[in-house]
Image (tube, rainbow, N blue to C red):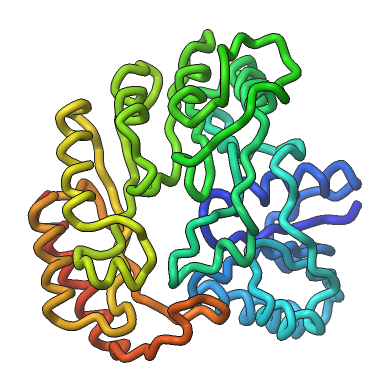
Amino acid sequence: MKKYFIITYGCQMNYNDSERRAYKLEKQGYKPAEKMEQADLVLINMCSVRQKPVDKVYQKINYLNSLKKKTEIILTGCILKEDKEKLKNKVDKILPIIDFNSPCKYKFRDKAFVPIMTGCNNFCSYCVVPYTRGPEKSRPADEIIKEVKNLIKKGYKEITLLGQNVNSYSYNMKHVTCNIKYGNGKINFPKLLRLINDLKGNFSISFLTSHPKDMSDELIEAIAKCEKVKKYIHLPVQSGDNEILKKMNRNYTVEHYKELVKKIRKKIPKVVLTTDIIVGFPGETEKQFENTKKLVEEIKFDNIYVARYSPRPGTAAFKMKDDVSPEEKMRRKKILEEILANQK
């Protein structure tokens, strides 16, 4: 029997896509291989968001092509057009991103990812997601509820709702075909949270990822009131300087972000708050980095994921001069991580 092996880079959306690909492959008669070298087919779920995972994909493909054993190499995921062109002759096939309604082979026994939307309309100047996943598309609410209900029946205890920007989830109820009572109008993300929270069963709900510009009072209230929703919010700030935020096309200010945090902590006193920060964005001066440093010191996040800026072809920031040295980016990254470590 033929064997497959999946390698995944990037965010939880990609990991969930890989789970759906695994289901398809097993339906086609493949069995999972314990090691990549044992596989007849290797599927690489790629992420063009940062250069490092892109470099890793190139290394993996070159390695697989160097093996004496003939292995079918399939590429999928968030792939920039430039990367597709460079890789198309090195792999056997490039597949589009799998539909989020495809059946899934869940990796874990007690926790599962459930996509509620895909794509993004925000066009942050450093990000390739709108070019690789396309515009925002919300999944029908009844399909989400159906998947969650099935997971609860199977004994899953942790449900994580996924989307590039879950806060902007929106689905028109006139398209709903199941018997769940939805009320009137559109279902936004707070309503969806309440609907899932009201399902019977012993389980918890979390979600990724939120955009500060769409973090509404209604959503904060829903997180606070829904007992099954974990009091955890990942709210990427990316920079603590307004000029850099404007260049990033983030559509909020540092002041707005701080006000949001104040509201969140007032409504949800025991909230766990984490964030993403990019250091070394084009033109970021020492003073602008100091503003980020001050924000980190002031807010006291529970965790920070610090990324060093890397230019991505096709984005608006790619046209800007990448003028912060790799050494300086690393220095700034370490400073923020040290502040976090000292606050714990």
Q: Residue at x 36, y 30 (%)?
A: 219
Q: Quadrant of residue 97?
A: bottom right
Q: Position of residue 89 (x, y in %)?
A: 81, 84
| Spot occupied by residue 255 in the image (x, y as percentages of width and height) | 17, 53
Residue reaching furthest front?
Answer: 185
Q: Which of the two residues, 291 or 6, is positioned nearer the viewer here?
A: 291
Q: Residue at x 43, y 32 (%)?
A: 206
Q: Nearer the viewer, residue 120 or 39?
A: 120
Q: Decide if residue 145 is on the left or right side of residue 226.
A: right
Task: Examine the image and state in which quarter residue 78 appears.
Answer: bottom right
Q: Residue at x 22, y 27 (%)?
A: 268
Q: Residue 117, relative to residue 267: is it above or below?
A: below
Is 129 placed above or below 195 here? below
How many labels were placed on the picture?
Answer: 0
Residue placed most toward the observer, 322 or 147 = 322
Give left or right: position of 150 versus 30: left
